[in-house]
Structure formats: C-alpha cells, structure tokens
Image (cartoon, rainbow, N blue to C red):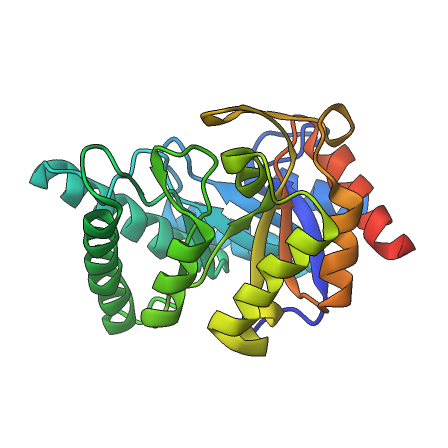
Amino acid sequence: MPPEKLLFGTAGVPGSAKGKNSTSGIERIRELGLECMELEFVQGVRMSEKGAENVWESASKEGVALSVHAPYYINLNSPEEEKLKASVERIYQAARIGSLCGAESIVLHAAFYQKSSKESTYEKVSKALRELTGQLLDEGIPAVLRPETMGKRTQFGTLEEVLALSSEIEGVRPCLDFSHMHAREGKENSYPEFTAILSKVEEALGKEGLCSMHMHVSGIEYDRNGEKKHLLLKESDFNYPELMKALKDFRARGLLICESPSQEEDALLLKNCYQSI
C-alpha cells in the first residue's frame, strides 16, 4: 500500500549508524526521525533469504518503509545476449530478495543508448521489462520495477521515456531523480519546472501516480554532458526549497530518498524544509 504521506530517508545505511548492515541502518533511520531507507544492492544482490527476513522484521518493528536499488551492472540494450540475460537476472534477484525484505519498489538504471537509436533502445527496454514483470507476477513476487530518470545524456532515462514505460506496462512505475533531470540539461530547477514535471506524472499516471512516488534528491555537479557527481545540497545549485513546495502543492506521497554525500543530514534538511512550508 502507498504511504499516506511523503516519507524521507537515505540511500543505504546512514553514515552515523552503529553498524554497516541494513538492520543497523533501519534502527538509525528511526532514531533520526526519518521514515524510509533504500537498500543498496548496487554492487550485487548479496543478501540471503534469512538476511532478508531479518531486515523485514527490523523494518516492521521500527515502522521504516524500504525500497531497493538494483545493481548498477545493467544494460537492457546490450547487443550481447549473455549480458542482456545477466542484466535481467540481476533485476529479478533484486526484486526477489527485496520483496522478502518488505520492499516493493525496485529502482534500476535501465540502459545505455550506445550506437542504437532512442526508439530502438526504448523497444528493447520495454520488451525486457514486460517479460520481467510477467515473470514476477507469475511467481507472486509483489515488486514494482522503477526505471530511473538518468543524469547523463548517454543513458536511457528521460522523463518522457520512464513515464511512457510506466503508462504502458503494468508493474512499472518511474523513479524520479530530480537532481539527474536537472543535471542532464542544466534545467528543471525552478518551481514552474518542478510543477511541470509533476503535471506530466499526473497526466501519464493519474492521481495514483502522485500518491505512490519514488524519488531521489541530492546536490549535484554537472557539465554539458550531464551529471558528474553528487554534492551536499547547500554546496550545489539545486533548488530544493522550490521542489519541496511543488511536492507539497501537488500533495505528492511516497518515498523521497536523499543521495547526498552526507545523506542523513540532507534528508533531515529536506524534511524540515518540507514541514516548514
């Protein structure tokens, strides 16, 4: 079930947690007054079913909502069949173990254009995600696959691409990385631009799309090719106060994950800014 409000949290275990494992991270999230955490499977799905059960128990006890970021090593546009199959398997395993943790949303970096046209890349990504969502449904795995809006122009993942996939395929929804969208073109950094993005979400997915969002926010450094690296919010030009206002005005609900270098500090900054509006 989608949360009844906007939840704030971190990408992975907060740096101030006593331990480096997910259960320590969940406990620290609750201590900080945050409400959600993204499990980072970015280097591979290395959690056992027993470990996932422990994470589920901890998250249930602490009342912390979870999501998952699938491994980085994914390219659903790979011309090599072996690499394509490996990419699909990594997403599947992230969804399987993530769902055992109690996470529904599975964030993924879908593809690179490489030498393909944008249209051809879209078709390959769409085909792979249709097959994957069908498999998850058949196996009773309650996961939602969330292709992310990406920060480099070489990467598949414009707002239009992820919204099209989400409107066409049952079991696919977007992960809106607002910092990536800003870095990709050097735009999308004002209240009118943020509201235009949210309007497109509502147009494509209805009110339900705004009530079950998954978002990434951080400070970001970029150049004419797009994203370079994440920064602290106050060390970047990202206009987070106006984003918070837009999210409040649109009554957006779901998970807002902070990916800044000091995640918990910036997650609390975002939450406090949102609550002050």
User: Furthest-right residue in view?
Assistant: 276
Label tally: 0
**Which residue reaches farthest left?**
81
| Residue 134 drawn at (x, y percent) | 23, 69
Q: Is residue 250 placed above or below 116 in the rendered structure?
A: below
Q: Which residue: 78% across, 34% down?
A: 265
Kindly indicate the quadrant of the structure image that contains residue 11: top right
Quadrant where the image shows the N terminus: bottom right
Q: Is residue 268 left or right of residue 149?
A: right
Whole-percent x, y for residue 171 in the image: 37, 68
Residue in the picture at 58% in, 58% down? 197
**Is the residue 250 above or below the residue 229 in the image?**
below
Vertical order, 147 against 232 (above or below)? below
Quarter of the picture holding the C terminus: bottom right
The image quarter containing residue 110 is: top left
For residue 61, say whether it is visible: yes
What residue do we see at 53% from left, 77% from top?
Answer: 206
Percent coordinates x, y for residue 160 in the rendering: 42, 56
* Picture quadrant of residue 123: bottom left
